[in-house]
Image (cartoon, rainbow, N blue to C red):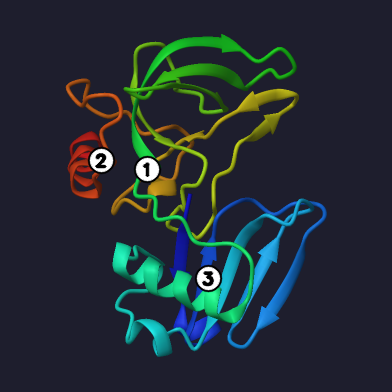
Amino acid sequence: MLITSYNPAAWGDTLVAVMGPDTPSQSSRQAGDIVGIYDATDTAIGFNFFNVSQWLGAISGQGQVTLTAAQVATLNAAISASGLAGQLVDEATPRIVIGKIVAIADHPDSDHLHVTQVDLGATQAQIVCGAPNAALGQTVVAALPGAMMPDGKIIWAGALRGVESDGMLCAARELAIPGAPQARGILIMPDELAAGTPFDLAVATAVVAAQTA
């Protein structure tokens, strides 16, 4: 996976590229304007590109940005020229998608968490969810491992009270939908949306407007 973000107000002309979660034992190496971050097996899990405009020119947008295949290739050439190990992997698979709750059970070690099985179209994921309105058969928005939320939080696979969870079922406020209610609860989407469909902010905004009218 590849998550790239750019925040000139906070970091200056620096592009941050994330390819994996932080690990308890990791290291960094710098060569010129590039810093590589590596896990305990010396696998690259991220890169920071200082003065990134020297390679990509001006970057439009702020927060999470999507690089073209040509831009990824340019940065990979810069990594190779620097002598650092690792490469960026151009990966455009959507990480926030429509899902269908096809099974739900109480968490064995919690009085409010649920263990859901979510149909994602081509795959199925187990996601632990604490929303009070989660129920069997709902059409929901699932943030999968590698998703960057609007607030900058990155979703990784993990465990909640000992039960594996491969993502998060999203509330409207977590998706930064205009007019989203602040009460707890996941966003319920129209059933006609197919599992695996990429999340569409415009569609979700219309759904929230209808639900709160």
Query: 10 Å neighbourhood of mark 3: few (<14), some, or many (≥20)?
Result: some
Distance Cα–Cα, label 1 vs label 3? 27 Å
Residue shown at the point (33%, 86%) measured from the top left: 57
Q: Quadrant of residue 155?
A: top right
Residue shown at the point (42%, 57%) measured from the top left: 150
Q: Is residue 122 left or right of residue 23?
A: left
Tell me the number on the disc at residue 79.
Answer: none
Residue 160 lies, with reference to residue 170, above or below; the image says above
Indicate which disc, 1 or 3, sits on the residue closer to the N terminus: 3
Residue 77 lies, with reference to residue 109, above or below; the image says below
Q: Where's residue 123, x and y in %?
A: 40, 22
Check disc 3 and report its element: helix, strand or loop. Answer: strand
Q: Name the residue type under label 3.
A: Val
Residue 104 lies, with reference to residue 177, above or below; the image says above
Indicate which disc, 2 or 1, sits on the residue closer to the N terminus: 1
Instruction: Kindly tell me whether residue 6 is visible in this rendering.
Output: no
Q: Disc 2 vs disc 3: Cβ atoms closer than 8 Å?
A: no
Question: Which residue position holds label 1?
Answer: 172
Q: Name the residue type under label 1.
A: Ala
Q: Disc 2 vs disc 1: Cβ atoms closer than 8 Å?
A: yes
Q: Where's residue 132, x and y in %?
A: 51, 24
Q: Name the residue type under label 2.
A: Val
Question: Which residue position holds label 3?
Answer: 16
Tell me the number on the disc at residue 208.
Answer: 2
Q: Is residue 102 left or right of residue 12?
A: left
Indicate which disc, 2 or 3, sits on the residue closer to the N terminus: 3
Query: 10 Å neighbourhood of mark 2: few (<14), some, or many (≥20)?
Result: some
